[in-house]
Image: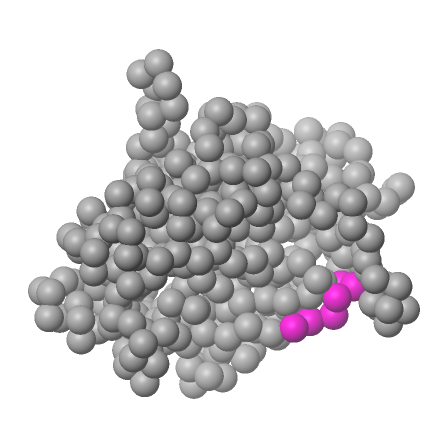
Amino acid sequence: MREVVIVEGCRTAVGRRKGMFANYRADELAAIVLEEVAKRSNVDKEMVEDVIMGCVTQVGEQAGNVARTAALIAGFPIDVPGVTIDRQCGSSQQAVHFGAQAIAAGDMDVAIAGGVESMTRAPMFSNVQETKPSKKLTSRYEIVNQGVSAEKIAEKWEFSRHQLDEFSLQSHQRALKAIEQGKFEKEIVPVETGEGTVVQVDEGPRADTTIGALAGLKTVFKENGKITAGNASQMSDGASAVMLMSAKKAAELGLKPKAKIVARTVVGSDPTLMLTGPIQATRKVLKKADLTIADMDRYEVNEAFAPVPMAWLQDIGADPEKLNVNGGAISLGHPLGATGTKLLISLVHELERSGGKYGLLAICEGMGTANATIIERIE
């Protein structure tokens, strides 16, 4: 198997739903990061052998294979193909896995993996709103909304509402500090949104967030429950992409990769709890890499809901000071199809800043699946 490296990566800032990207088409937003990642990589577009993008709600402007249409908008030659995949919240992380697998197997030398989601223009569930689960499925499993799953996780792990809100406040505080220190500037490509306005700062973090404000929010999924809009991820708009390559090809081109992909995995998990998969995926990917959680210098575990990374921390025995150190989806937002590569890009940059060697990325996904990836920074 050939070694697979990450040459470059970039993302847009993340906009709130109905926020700064409300008037921006998803295919055009995706085209921006595709063009930029090729430019930053110093790779001719015709060298790219596939564009693999994640997108969850594939309707409207996000339908019709948005990876392909975005690549055409970005000026890639017509013989560069594109494919759009849906593994729910881990879609673009899975895009990385598919691209890496093709390169490792020798089918390709160069591929772009990424994702896009406009939760403003293609609202969540708008592609399935008329569809009810099969009775053959519901006879086997209790199929519930993800928010109900989050309630079940909070209950099973005995997290209090106050603990969930404390974790959420920390997410905002870490994100605001990261923005103030300019930690995201290198990874974000500026986007013109009209009338001379250029956006390059994540829109989600709220400086006015307090424990009192979070405590005052009503629960959404269960009366007298624990999950609120404040301790759940924000609906968002955004796009992200990474340039993947065989190490041999990167050397031939005289490129200096940022990181190599050490191990990757995907697992199925309880479809009712649904969001606990990162625990199993982490254990499996660590075993594949012959590493331990102590070897990881940073980890990104998507904050779909506060109980998800909290349960992961508890069961894995991980260090909370290494988790989502610059905030997560509760504060920075969660543009579904784009989140995987967004977090991967942030993880690469954080390892560079901190001098860390290994990073772990794990994301929970709808209907009970999860991806996990381990990367190693290249000095």
Q: Quadrant of the C terminus?
A: bottom left
Q: Is 134 or 180 nearer to us in this picture?
A: 134
For this view, does 330 lie left or right of residue 23? right
**Residue 190 in sight here:** yes
x then y, percent, for residue 283: 56, 78
Q: Residue at x 69, y 37 (%)?
A: 229
User: Is residue 152 highlighted in magenta?
Assistant: no
* Quarter where residue 149 is shown: bottom right
Q: Is 326 or 120 nearer to us in this picture?
A: 120
Q: Is 234 or 244 nearer to us in this picture?
A: 244
Q: Residue at x 58, y 50 (%)?
A: 56
For this view, does 306 lie left or right of residue 188? right
Q: Residue at x 75, y 44 (%)?
A: 129
For this view, does 275 lie left or right of residue 240? right
| Magenta region | 268-273
**Residue 168 in sight here:** no
Q: Is residue 100 above or below residue 77?
A: below
Q: Quadrant of the N terminus?
A: bottom left
x then y, percent, for residue 188: 33, 40
Q: Residue at x 43, y 69 (%)?
A: 98
Magenta-highlighted stretch: main secondary structure?
A: loop
User: Is residue 269 highlighted in magenta?
Assistant: yes
Q: Is residue 215 above or below residue 338?
A: above
